[in-house]
Image (tube, coloured by chain):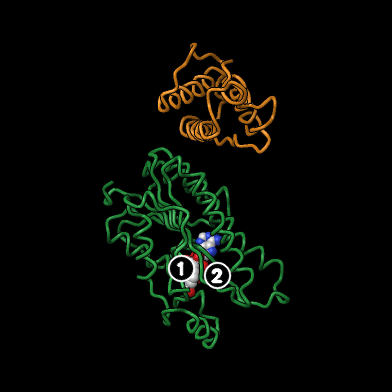
Chain colours: A green, B orange
Amino acid sequence: MNPTQSVMLITGTRKGIGKFLVEYYTQRGYLVEGCSRETPDWTCQGYHHHCTDVADEAGVQAMMNDIRKRQGRLDILINNAGIASMNHCLLTPIATAERIFRTNFIGSFLLLRESAKLMKKNRYGRIVNMGTVATPMKLEGESMYAASKAAVVNMTQVLAHELAPFGVTCNVVGPTPIETDLIRGVPKQKIQAILDRLAVKRLGHFEDVTNVIDFFIRPESDYITGQVVYLGGV
Amino acid sequence: MTQPSREAIQTLVTQCLQEILNQRGTELSAPLTADTPMFGTGGLLDSIGIVTMIVDVEQTIAAEFNATVSLADDRAMSQRNSPYRSISALTDYILGQLSEGA
Ligand SMILES: NC(=O)c1ccc[n+]([C@@H]2O[C@H](COP(=O)([O-])OP(=O)(O)OC[C@H]3O[C@@H](n4cnc5c(N)ncnc54)[C@H](OP(=O)(O)O)[C@@H]3O)[C@@H](O)[C@H]2O)c1
């Protein structure tokens, strides 16, 4: 497969890791489609934006129809959209719990289901879901966030089996803290305490994430599926 | 949207099934008819085959008739009168959905 013709869909592209992924993969010749709820304040050659909430089934289906009509194919999905909320469980409103699960878990599922339908046509697909070290580290104050990503991991491992007959692989990359708005509200000492528990004691960089994604999406990685790679040596 | 005719849907379903059977190199012992068992006892498709079939039919209907049908149903897979049991049963099921949505 010629990477210059590959069509990639990235969710949560307005800012943070998703925005970096758009820049990185358009520079490498991918045709990139992406979404977030709000319109980004930037544009990028080779990138097409959809204002879509990943947890809205009709919206996701409309976006996929549009991709099918314009591109005729989809090779890669990066399920990056995600939200977090730090709170003791005794202080976590049900609305927060639901919002986190709808975006992180249901959203990933919807994108995955609709993308796999498109990928199936060419019997080729690469799906990468976003996990987090909060899951294996059992971070206090992140019960809903960590659990929603644990659900993503488990779903990925089951779907690796269900999608293998269609030539679609499904893996997870689990970053350590990376400086984006997602962790802006987390106190410095909390972040430092997490870094102190890593084998490699530093913040993660965007390039640490693309390094793993690059491996998962290579055509040669057709025998790599259902895997979870955590950064930093958790 | 004007409702597609029964013939149009049945032809579409038959073509999708034929294509899957060709891809999988399934040999037919008798020509395909509207009542040939498709899924379930003695059916031509296994569980991966029926998943492929349902998605293909949904997508072809979306492309040709600009209509969204959702043929996935928790009960349909196991139901005795499953809408997946034959071409004609699936055709009826699709027509039912199209008229509901109209
Ligand atoms: N940064 C970290 O330390 C870290 C560590 C581990 C894992 N991660 C994971 O990495 C992913 C990206 O995180 P980030 O740090 O880049 O976060 P971020 O800077 O807060 O960006 C989140 C992105 O997701 C979009 N988004 C949020 N909810 C959405 C929805 N319902 N539908 C569509 N788009 C939505 C946002 O755009 P809109 O607001 O416009 O929708 C935004 O573009 C997340 O899955 C996160 O869990 C991050």
Chain for numbered disc 1 = A
Above or below: residue A180 compared with residue A170: below
Q: Amino acid at mark 2?
A: Pro
**Label 1, label 2: how far apart the Cα atoms are:** 9 Å
Secondary structure under the numbered disc 1 in the rendered image: strand
Secondary structure under the numbered disc 2 in the rendered image: helix
- Residue drawn at point x = 50 percent, y = 19 percent: B11
- Residue drawn at point x = 53 percent, y = 23 percent: B44
Instruction: Give the camera-side residue of A159 and B64.
Output: A159
* Marks 1, 2 in one chain: yes
**Badge 2 density bin: few <14, some 14–19, many ≥20, Cα 10 Å:** few
Give yes or no for contact between labels 1 and 2 (Cβ–Cβ under 8 Å): yes
**Badge 1 density bin: few <14, some 14–19, many ≥20, Cα 10 Å:** some
Above or below: residue B95 compared with residue A24: above
Residue A131 location (% of width, % of height):
50, 64
Tell me, for residue A230, which label it has, or none. Answer: 1
Residue A225 location (% of width, % of height):
44, 52
Residue A163 location (% of width, % of height):
48, 44
Chain for numbered disc 2 = A
Q: Earlier in the sequence, mark 1 or mark 2?
A: 2
Above or below: residue A193 compared with residue B26: below
Q: In the shown orientation, is residue B11 left or right of residue A28?
A: right
Q: Is residue B10 visible?
A: yes
Tell me, for residue A136, which label it has, or none. Answer: 2
